[in-house]
Image: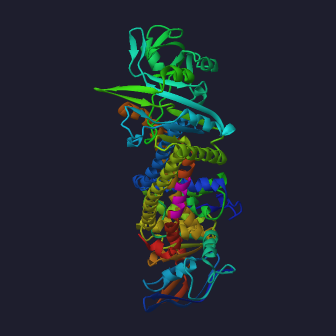
Amino acid sequence: MGLNIFDIPPAPTPGAAGGLGLTKLRRSVGLAVRSLWLHKLRAALSVLGIVIGTSAVIALMAFGRGSMQDALNDIKRQGATNVIVRSVKPTDDSSTGSRSFVLTYGLKFADLDRFATFGDSLVRVVPMRVFMSEVRYLERMDPKGRLVGTIPEYTEVNKLALARGRFLTHEDERAMANNCVLGSAIADKLFPFEDPIGRTVMIRDNRFLVVGVCADRMPTGGSGGSQAAEDFNHDVYIPFNTCRARMGEVVYIRAAGSRSAEKVQINQVTMTVDADFETSEGRQKVRALGDAIRDMLKQDHIKDDWALTVPLDRLEEAERAQNRFTSLLVLIASISLLVGGIGIMNIMLATVTERTREIGIRRALGAKQKDIISQFLVEAVVQTTVGGLTGVVIGLAIVFGAPPLWRLVAGSNLPAQLSYWSIVLSVGVSILVGVMFGLYPAWRAARLDPIEALRHD
Amino acid sequence: MPAIVQVIDLVKHYYMGDVTVQALSGVNLAFDEGDFVALMGPSGSGKSTLMNVLGCLDRPTSGQYVLRDQNVADMTDDELSEVRSTYLGFIFQAYNLLPQYTVVENIEIPLLYQGVRLDEDTHARCVALSEMVGLGDRLDHRPVQLSGGQQQRVAIARALVNDPQLILADEPTGNLDSRTSDEIMHMLADLNRAGKTIIMVTHENDIAAWARRVVRMRDGMIESDERNDTVSFAEMR
């Protein structure tokens, strides 16, 4: 047959082109994929831990952040720089001495004057009288009606939006006008067909002219203790002075078979502190003022008939909860990635044993120890990277797929907010796991004696 | 002709537990460039150990091994790898192709470890080599799709891809039937005529008959070393 070796193109000069960089990397990744492809199922199973770990991190992180954002929005609705003081019926009423028919408690008008001493630190001080009251228009009435006597600044403190008409004005306040603004639900109830503006409603034997209707308002979530969940859509707002003049301080409560009365001057005072809640100085100021107001009220109120709420505390509580949640998540993620990494190491060790002969062949054909190390390291990293990326895809599918499904099944909202650094982090950690747990098997492979390895079968 | 390989007082001990096995006890040999040497001997005679040392896969306990002008005996592992990848070509009894690679890719492997950029030129060389060994129509086949003889031809092409100074063949026909063995030996003889130095381990006399020189070993020492007069007959077959 006669071999004509002289017609063959010449061999390249060793080490001349020093093929480094991207081409070499792409090549070794390609070769690693080819080797892994021989055992597709095994490779897939071995990265399952990584896949589950990363997808769990991304999904849980998104749901954690989503509920955190939900809580934050709720707090911002209440006003993050507000300090809220409420009148609370004291649990122990024996201190009133006589078994009085009328229970007197709560914030006084005098307290308002004291709050005024804080001057410019408080941008707004908004007092409120709140009590349940029937509201009637002709034969229609809303039994869930709630009367709120307050001042015009109420809109700013509570971020109240109007659907139509106007809110109460300082002129209403000064003139003790019998004007009122209806919440959206009560307006629908009393005026299902006509425009409420300009009509007159009856509240506790007084006539009030409707001057505005509020837009639908989100209820605030309750945080237990001093602050219960509130629904604002059955509110009727009247001027604070009008309320003081027309309604008096005593409210009769009709319960089944009995009557009781309470005497309360002010039910709630909402104060807005002049501070920026995004900065720590601002937060400190809000908290300091909250403490000052608390101390002041303690001085004057013998009974425990008031409660002070700083929404910012809830904000920080929510942030602390978020931090706890995040560190727990990181722990779970590290455990699952550790388990995943051990899975990779296990399979890589098996691979090295199984491919001992291949290692021997490569060594005989000129592979250095570091070539073998990089070969097996690349295989491990390719596996974990593919696993990490698969986990990201699954995680994203959960983040975007679960909320609609949840609404369909459970009927409630499942807030999710994707955090981009969780993607970067989980893929990065996956790669790192590949390096960490691939290193030992790769080192074992490189350390094999070429002769022994060649003899292996 | 200048000596391409020279070993002086080569000694190799193996330690198996407490027992020291003397695999090579003072071997002196010199091979000329362009020679075709058959290394023979019963098992345990030290011929495999000598092959491993010559193939830079193993280091001698003492003695010198000069390949061209380099003393290989006290090189580091990395340097030995470099010598293997630059100067040596291996042909094994069990072919030792990588199952996940195609014919062309198997031939490429030694270049992979030379730090050479793999491009159209290197690819063309690999294709030309596969054509030379008669596998031009099976470039994309995997080893499992090839017969033993075809696999060994791929291995020969692979051993040539880095244009080695020395080809080491370890019982290259050990797994083949006599007809295929003849084909492979024809190829090796052709390569030798084209100027390649070949050292081949075999324990079959009719295979050794292809070589120009036959070295017989026993108990770690050279038993006989003679020029092969029948070489011309072998070539005429």
Instruction: Judge whether residue A58 is colored magenta.
Output: no
| Residue B16 picture location, percent across and down | 43, 87
Closer to us: A110 or A21:
A110
Relative horizontal placement of residue A280, taking residue A444 as reference (left or right): right
Q: How many marks?
A: 0
Most distant residue in the left direction: A257
| Residue B140 picture location, percent across and down | 51, 51
Relative horizontal placement of residue A211, taking residue B3 as reference (left or right): left
Q: Report the predominant secondary structure element of the magenta stretch.
A: helix
Quadrant for the N terminus of chain B in the image: bottom right
Q: In the rendered structure, which segment of residues is drawn in magenta?
A: A428-436
> Residue at left 47%, top 23%?
A147
Residue A31 showing in the rendered view: no
Closer to us: B87 or B20:
B20
Most distant residue in the right direction: A16
> Residue at left 54%, top 38%?
A84
